[in-house]
Amino acid sequence: MQSRLVYYSRTGTTRLLADAISARLVAEEAEITCARYGPGLFGWLRAVRDSLRGVRPEIAFEVRDENTDCLIIGGPVLAGSLAAPVRSYIAQLNHLPDRIGVFLTSGGPPPHPRAEEELRALLGRAPDAMLWLRAADVREGRHMDEVEDFFRELTHS
Ligand SMILES: Cc1cc2nc3c(=O)[nH]c(=O)nc-3n(C[C@H](O)[C@H](O)[C@H](O)COP(=O)(O)O)c2cc1C
């Protein structure tokens, strides 16, 4: 199965998880960047405000038709919502592959119903596999079992 993993990470936590997942799935990995949410207070405030308001910011990422068997999308939960750059990415996709996996990192434990609802609305369906992890667990390396479960769900369900 050919897999592609696309993610946004503002402060690096989601990137750590993206690297672990792409190593397990042997997926081609690509990072979305967005200058609007840089480090510092203003970047933080914009990230909160845009996430809450459903903004779709400009992203530095060439969105193409994802001609792959499986697409894995990742990002952080910001202000209870999907990080705005992830929203922009999904909204620009013309075509979705048969298999879709989503992984999200957050400070607090799931559920994050607003993020989940938004995800379903943008994808037009629920993902085939979903992985939620707390930032502290990712940073301390407590995610390998969850990555394995995610891999199984994505490839065997
Ligand atoms: C602006 C901002 C808003 C956040 N809002 C939430 C939130 O509503 N719920 C939550 O559980 N975590 C929240 N977090 C924590 C992040 O989801 C968490 O730290 C995430 O792993 C960051 O991922 P990244 O390092 O890949 O950017 C927030 C963090 C930031 C910076």
Image: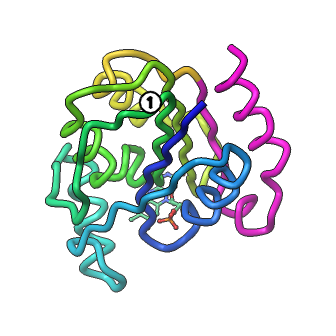
Identity of the residue furthest to the bottom in this view: 40
Q: Is residue 53 left or right of residue 126?
A: left
State the scheme by which the image is colored. Answer: rainbow
Residue 142 quadrant:
bottom right
Quadrant including the N terminus:
top right
Residue 88: where, in percent of width, then height? 22, 47
- In this orientation, which residue lies closer to the viewer: 85 or 111? 85
Q: Is residue 2 above or below residue 98?
A: below
Circle 1: residue type? Glu
Q: Residue at x 36, y 33 (%)?
A: 67
> Which contiguous range is marked in magenta?
129-157
Q: Is mark 1 within 8 Å of ligand 1?
A: no
- Estimate how packed mark 1 is, as few (under 14), some (14 to 19) or many (20 or more) residues with alpha carbons within 10 Å: many
Q: Is residue 80 magenta?
A: no
Residue 114 pos. (x, y %): 39, 33
Residue 84 lies, in percent from the top left, at 28, 52
Q: Is residue 136 magenta?
A: yes
Disc 1 is placed on an element classified as helix
Note whether 121 is above or below 135 in the view shown.
above
Q: Along the horizontal axis of the image, is 1 left or right of 67?
A: right
Quadrant of the rendering where the C terminus is positioned: top right
Q: Residue at x 79, y 68 (%)?
A: 140
**x then y, percent, for residue 53:** 18, 46
What residue is shown at x 34% (from left), y 26% (from top)?
Answer: 96
Magenta: main secondary structure equals helix
Identify the residue shown where x is 33% and y is 48%.
Answer: 86
Q: Looking at the picture, does residue 8 appear above or below residue 81?
A: below
Count of numbered labels shown in the rendering: 1
Name the residue tied to disc 1. 116
